[in-house]
Image (cartoon, helix red, strand yellow):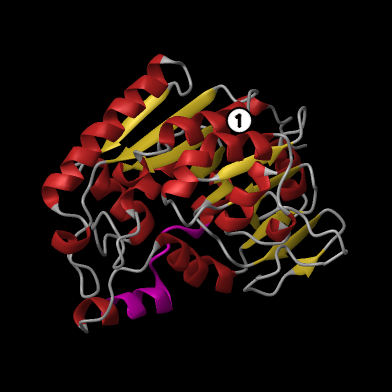
């Protein structure tokens, strides 16, 4: 008989970095407030400047002095989130972090220890964030994600029950966007992977790192992710002067999907996400209003079925 589930089996884990300094003080509390039943709340703060790769020059994209100033600002924000009891644990990831060796061995078969992917996407901070919690489940959000959740409903608790029905379900996510009202039977209008539809969820083979519920017990059986054909591809990239390393979500897709691992996308309209892409002045100036609308389950019709935030539509929506 399966062990009865309770919310103490979940750690809420959020990633932020220097790039989030203009909004993390608003978005992180908004995420936490949607999960009042989860008491373990871990904030990972990435303090590492992306390394130089074939496709990224950090001296151009992330000038050192400017980056270091951003790191100091995000550290202050993180400490304030801790003192305000928004989160109860902080972990700062630095380039010389002792956990990097451990994470490289655990997830990457020791093939690389770089803190970021070839294009500058976070690498090691994700693996550390998934490994530090001692709970079976890790409920992860990138620090810019925005979540609607009906009061009294917790999508993660709902997801655990559905994941128990499918051994291959190693991750789950809520609706990827505000629902479409015409019975459109795909997770979003721009869905990129084939999805199999069931009564309460869709199931597919993509593992986005933006947000998800992660089952450590199941995923540990797929480690390390670097093996077989994936290892050969990465070796060719590493020594063939190609983009290296690949991002965590691509690595998980290439490694786990061929071996049968799947992700559940919940159909419940009681929880859904919005992913902001444009972080310009219109976004920053109106963010409190956007978060209030989302918390109330309100959104412009243009956002229905669309994952990435339509900033123009949202800006007009809050003014009407």
Residue at point 80%, 47% (across, down):
269
Q: Is residue 175 above or below residue 132?
A: below
In the image, residue 173 lies in the stretch drawn in magenta: no
Region of the chain picked out in magenta, as a range: 222-235
Residue at point 23%, 56% (across, down):
50
In the image, residue 230 lies in the stretch drawn in magenta: yes
Q: Is residue 319 left or right of residue 73?
A: right
Q: Quadrant of residue 261?
A: bottom right
Q: In terms of depth relative to the viewer, which is nearer, 136 or 268?
A: 268
* Numbered disc 1: secondary structure: helix
- Mark 1 lies on residue: 9
Query: Residue 82: x, y in percent?
Result: 39, 20
Q: Is residue 69 above or below residue 258?
A: above
Q: Is residue 303 above or below residue 244?
A: above
Q: Is residue 297 above or below residue 119?
A: above
Q: In terms of depth relative to the viewer, which is nearer, 282 or 64?
A: 282
Residue 143 visible to an observer of this rendering: no
Query: Residue 240: x, y in percent?
Result: 22, 84
Residue 16 visible to an observer of this rendering: yes
Q: Is residue 183 left or right of residue 21?
A: right
Quadrant where the N terminus sits is: top right
Q: In terms of depth relative to the viewer, which is nearer, 188 or 284?
A: 284
Q: In terms of depth relative to the viewer, which is nearer, 303 or 118?
A: 303
Q: Is residue 143 left or right of residue 199?
A: left
Q: Quadrant of residue 58?
A: bottom left
Residue at point 63%, 33% (across, down):
292
Residue at point 51%, 43% (across, down):
141
User: What secondary structure predominates along the stretch shown in magenta?
Assistant: helix
């Amino acid at each position: 008989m399966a062990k009865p589930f309770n919310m103490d089996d979940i750690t809420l884990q959020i990633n932020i970095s220097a790039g989030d300094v203009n909004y993390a003080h608003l978005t992180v509390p908004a995420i936490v407030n949607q999960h009042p039943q989860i008491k373990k709340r871990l904030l990972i703060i990435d303090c590492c400047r992306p390394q130089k790769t074939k496709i990224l020059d950090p001296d151009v994209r992330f000038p050192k002095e400017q980056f270091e100033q951003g790191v100091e600002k995000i550290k202050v924000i993180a400490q304030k989130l801790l003192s305000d009891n928004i989160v109860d644990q902080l972990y700062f990831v630095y380039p010389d972090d002792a956990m990097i060796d451990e994470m490289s061995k655990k997830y990457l078969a020791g093939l690389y220890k770089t803190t970021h992917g070839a294009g500058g996407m976070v690498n090691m901070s994700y693996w550390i964030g998934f490994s530090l919690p001692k709970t079976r489940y890790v409920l992860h959000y990138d620090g810019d994600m925005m979540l609607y959740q009906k009061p009294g409903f917790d999508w993660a608790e709902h997801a655990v029950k559905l994941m128990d029905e499918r051994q291959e379900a190693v991750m789950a996510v809520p609706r990827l966007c505000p629902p479409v009202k015409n019975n459109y039977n795909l997770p979003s209008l721009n869905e990129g992977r084939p999805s199999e539809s069931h009564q309460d969820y869709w199931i597919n083979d993509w593992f986005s790192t933006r947000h998800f519920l992660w089952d450590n017990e199941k995923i540990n059986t797929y480690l390390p992710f670097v093996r077989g054909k994936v290892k050969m591809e990465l070796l060719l990239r590493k020594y063939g002067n190609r983009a290296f390393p690949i991002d965590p979500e691509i690595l998980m897709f290439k490694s786990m999907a061929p071996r049968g691992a799947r992700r559940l996308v919940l159909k419940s309209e009681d929880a859904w996400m919005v992913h902001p892409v444009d972080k310009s002045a219109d976004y920053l100036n109106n963010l409190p209003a956007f978060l209030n609308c989302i918390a109330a389950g309100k959104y412009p019709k243009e956002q229905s079925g669309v994952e990435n935030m339509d900033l123009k539509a949202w800006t007009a929506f809050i003014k009407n």
